[in-house]
Amino acid sequence: MTKLWGGRFGDEPAPELLAFTESLSFDRLLANEDCAVLAAHSRALSRAGLITDAEADTVLTALEGIARDIASGAFPFDPGDEDIHTAVERALLERVPDAGPKVRAGLSRNDRVVSALRLWLVRHGRSVALSACDLIDALMERAREHPDALMPGYTHLQRAQPVSLAHHLLAHAFAFERDVRRMLDALGRTDVSPLGAGALAGSTLELDAHRSAHDLGFGFVASNSIDAVSDRDFVAEFCAALAIAGVHASRLGEEIVLWTTAEFGFAELSDAYATGSSLMPQKKNPDVAELARGKAGRLIGNLTGLLATLKGLPLAYNRDLQEDKEPLFDGVATMLTMIPALAGAVRTMRFDTDAMARAAGDDMLLATDIAEHLVTTGVPFRDAHETDTRNAPGPSASSVDAQLSHLDASLKQIRDALG
Ligand code: ARG
């Protein structure tokens, strides 16, 4: 059995140990990134004269083949492969028996794991951010369609003041816009290469960490090798951004659930984004919206679980850190299926603007605006608040156009930043 450790161990590892400690079942997602990290490290070794250019070339070709085989499903994983890093290295040793063993110099699994994970997040975090931009687009499209429709705005889920449907939809859009910016912000701090940190104290070999970082597409290099292998803030930050976005998706989902009830009757989901009941033929269920609400729980759980894992750890690497991957992978995968479904539901739902207008038509909803109008004529607000004023002017138009241009400019800037 090829392992990355165990040279001085007398006994083979117990099957229970392997079953409990393996991470291949989930970290195989890092295959491309792990191969990229090994490739960058091999180039660093050849630049330092520690392996020949020809050896580096054979290693790079082998790594490309390994990445391709893993992607196609043709890669023969071994039951003893503890994690993706072990599997890639085992295959490298098999495919390049001469140069393969030299590649490990100056590299530890500790800097390798976290380099691969950062690279993975930089690549896949962008997709989540772009997908959230599309949901914002969907909300903006619907707002543009309904510049004049009025609905009751709510506080305490009691009708409060009339607002435009566009204004209400854009409230959700602004929340998601902040989420996308939070993700970008977190990705900026993820864009730091830990490669060269070794196990925790760097290496005596003269390897150019800046060149390796550049080869991998990282913008920055970690300054402190102990921090480089211990830090999982970047995972926590992204999970936090996903949890908050999940909460926003949940609040939108809850409104879709409410609006599509017979009691509200403000909206109807298109058949393509609704589900039926196996028993009750009249039912049209808002499962997409309900699951958007439900998934927030797991996204919050991913964040709190990770923080609990991190909180007691001494520096530097501890095996507990292996628990960083599943919450992140799960959060990203959850978002990448949830957001398109929610965006589709938003794009295709039919708003019953007449029902909204009827609900907003209650004169009482104008009470605040009228009281404020009285204030402009010199009546103290306390007195205006008590006045019966059923015939005074309506609310000033909200600047939906200004909101849409703000969001347009912001989304353009975000998309440019995402490249
Ligand atoms: N699969 C492990 C992880 O994800 C690999 C790192 C183990 N490193 C070590 N020095 N034991 O964290």
Image (spheres, rainbow, N blue to C red):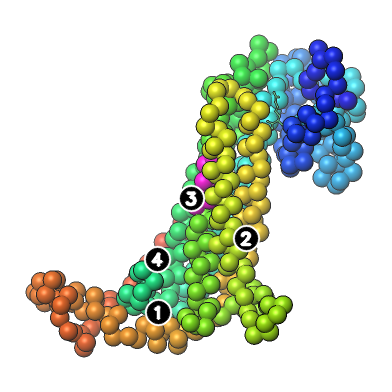
Secondary element under disc 2, as helix, strand or loop, is helix
At which x and y percent is residue 314? 55, 23
Asked whether the viewer can see residue 343, the reply is no
Quick check: is the Cβ at mark 1 less than 8 Å away from ligand 1?
no
Of tags 2 and 4, the one toward the viewer is: 2
Please tell me how crowded label 4 is: few (under 14), some (14-19), or many (20+) other residues with Cα within 10 Å.
some
Give the mark, 1 or 2, whose residue is nearer the N terminus: 1
Disc 3 residue type (three-letter)? Arg
Q: Mark 2 points at which residue?
A: 338
Start and end of the magenta stretch? 236-244
Mark 1 or mark 4, which is nearer to you? 1
Answer with mark 3 or mark 1, whichever residue precedes in sequence: 1
Instruction: Tell me the residue at 63%/31% (across/down).
Output: 321
Q: Circle 4 is placed at which residue position? A: 403
Q: What residue type is labelled 4?
A: Gln
Answer with mark 4 or mark 3, whichever residue precedes in sequence: 3
Q: Residues within 10 Å of mark 2 (few under 14, many from 20)?
A: many
Quadrant of the image where one finds ligand 1: top right
**Mark 3 lies within 8 Å of ligand 1 (Cβ measured):** no
- Residue 4 among those drawn in magenta: no
Picture residue at 54% right of the left edge, 37% below the top: 308
Ligand 1 near label 2 (Cβ, under 8 Å)?
no
Amino acid type, callout 1: Met
**Disc 3 + disc 1, Cβ < 8 Å:** no
Please, what is the three-letter code of the amino acid marked with disc 2? Met
